[in-house]
Amino acid sequence: MSGKGDISLKTKLLRTDCHFTWGLSKNDIDIGDLQQRIEDDIKYSSEKKAELKYLFSFLAFTKYLQDLPEEALEDLKKAEEDVYKHKKEGYQKMLVATYGDFAWLYYHMGDYSTSQTYLAKLEDIKKQFPPSVLQAAVNGEKGWTFLRCSCKNYEKAKECFRKALEEEPDDGEWNAGYAIALYRTEWDATSAEESQAVKQLRRALELNPEDALIMVLLGLRLCVFKKMREAEDLVEKALEISPDDPHVTRYVAKFYRQSGSLEKSVALLKKALEKAPSSAFLHHQIAICYKIMKYNLSTSGGQARNSAETELVHLSVYHLETAVNLRPSFIFALTGLAASFAECGDLSRAEEMFQNTAELARAKNDNLQTVYRYYGDFLQYQKKSESLAIKQYMEGSKMQADTREGKKCISRLHNLARKRIYRNPEDGEAFGILGYVHRTKDEKREAIECYEKALLLDLENEEYLSALCDLRLSLV
């Protein structure tokens, strides 16, 4: 193909709506872990004879990112075959993203003629459906892709499903996807009645009463709002419907963990591991259970407590190390492992791991706020350095104050500032920190009072003066 023809083809490809144009960056994805998770899902879903199209299409893209075009092509063919196998009404619209992927993949393989053939197939499909119907199908697949890809894409997933539902409000699949996206992004609801996630989970369950995953997710949300009787009924029914589904099992295990049934939780997670032995997530969840068991034991008293605690710490470390070996960029597991080393008294190793994890999280822009909070806890409680801990909590809270980790950073700053003022009422920096805490909570008058005290004790501090001016102006 001539250079001019190549440019023309590339222009057409850039107008397609598929994995290659959805802004999925290799740097934002743990490719190995993602591929393993998709393959585990394919294995289990095929046992249930479920549809696999989305999974094969996304798996193909992960293969492309790893420079395995021939394998990617085979997976795309499987995705296309799956659509024809199930052949629902209007099934052709489900091929829009897949044919876009085919066109891009053949283009990258240098087969421009076949690439154009798939673009022509796309044009044929576009003649069969209104643009809004095709866009809904694409948005649905895009939503599932973002949902599986990374927690950084959950908000994008939510928006994709919302748009898909504008066209097809009663589609069970899009409603389920939207419910899962809301479940993963909602942190500020204060009651079940206020919760959009609860409302949407109920809607998805109404459309598909046997969806065990939606059932257990609804149970988990209701558990947060202390609706325990309904939550328990939902979780038990979900486990009864899908006792071997690793996704359902792991969420039921989470429910048991949160309600204090730790032995049950560990047993279920180990059962899920039999289906997905390479799941770093499952190992991490087991480690969390052992950590909670150790904490409960340390506060309960009793003989032989020390040896039992030691055993639980070792079990937790084993599963965290396994999770990290399976997925080296698993930030939550890395911070948990660093904290475990600190508990064991190996402070130098913990320090090194926290610093390396912070570097990794910064480079990947992945859960850095979590690292700041955990590292701050380590500096405060194990290394007994309040000043260094405050720096970490400050950095964490400045990233975003209204997230779960952001609120924890703010809470710790508040407690440390109060403690320092109690020890020394002339501590200007402590009043400055307290002023910052009140400001982040939009408690302006309290913030002004604290900054005024901070300035009296540190007259040349421009940061306090600037904050005080801004706050006073905002009240005018």
Image (cartoon, rainbow, N blue to C red):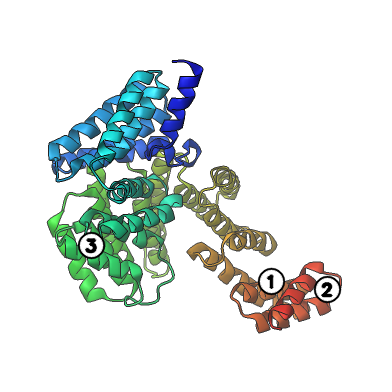
| Label drawn at residue 458 | 2
Distance CA(mark 2)–CA(mark 3): 57 Å
* Residue 331 at x, y percent in the picture: 48, 48
Determine crowd level at label 3: few under 14, some 14-19, many 20+ residues with C-alpha closer than 10 A: many
Residue designated by label 3: 204
Residue 41 at least partly seen: no
Question: Type of residue at label 1?
Answer: Ile
Extreme residue in the top direction: 1
Q: Residue at x 41, y 18 (%)?
A: 110
* Residue 149 at x, y percent in the picture: 39, 45
Q: Residue at x 30, y 69 (%)?
A: 198
Question: Type of residue at label 2?
Answer: Asp
Question: Residue 24 appears in which quarter of the rendering?
Answer: top left
Q: Secondary structure at mark 2?
A: loop
Q: Residue at x 37, y 59 (%)?
A: 184
Residue 171 at least partly seen: yes
